[in-house]
Image: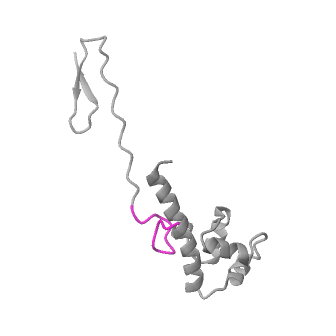
Amino acid sequence: MGPQARETVTERHWTCSRRLRERRRELGLTQAEVIARMGGANGLTNRSLSTMEHGRRIDVGWLPELATALECTITYLLGLTDDPRRWEPGAPVPAAAPAPPDPPDQAQPHQNWILSPQLNYPTSRAP
């Protein structure tokens, strides 16, 4: 993983922990009340929720239940949108650039390739 990807992962981790805590407080809930909203969440305790809110060991397996209990979306918790009710990320993900075409076969010089300057791939062949 490159440094930029690692930075994004770390940033998302801290955003998630901060938003768990902030969203709970916005709703005026205690950690025990969040656990109760999750139906008692067998295995999740006040202590484990506190651990997640403080950025230590976020258990992504609980994110769907936490998002439901906190009346928000998973994408909001991860910082992909600023609207707690929105699923789609706020900014579109840029599409990957198309791969450049293979160069023309040099073994067959009778094939003339015409390259489009805008698209940079073979558009037609001359006889």
Q: Is residue 89 magenta?
A: yes
Q: Can you name the residue that lies furthest to the right here?
A: 42
- Residue 55 falls in image quadrant: bottom right
Above-or-below relation of 2 to 68: above
What is the x, y in percent for residue 24? Answer: 60, 81
Q: Quadrant of the C terminus?
A: top left
Q: Is residue 41 above or below residue 109?
A: below
Identify the residue at horizontal 45%, vertical 73% (top origin).
Answer: 82
Look at the image and say whether residue 51 sits in the magenta stretch.
no
Q: Residue at x 64, y 71 (%)?
A: 52
Question: Looking at the picture, how far across and down is residue 103, in whole percent?
Answer: 31, 24
Compare residues 83 and 51 and report the one nearer the observer: 51
Q: Main secondary structure of the magenta part?
A: loop
Q: Give whichever of 22, 36 is nearer the camera.
A: 22
Name the residue at 54% across, 74% down.
18
Residue 79 screen position, x and y as percent: 49, 68
Image location (x, y in percent) of residue 74: 56, 67
| Part of the protein shown in magenta | 78-91
Left or right of 32 in this view: 102: left
Display colour scheme:
one colour
Is 8 or 71 nearer to us in this picture?
8
Q: Quadrant of residue 114?
A: top left
Total number of numbered labels?
Answer: 0
- Quick check: 119 left or right of 75? left
Q: Is residue 105 left or right of residue 53?
A: left
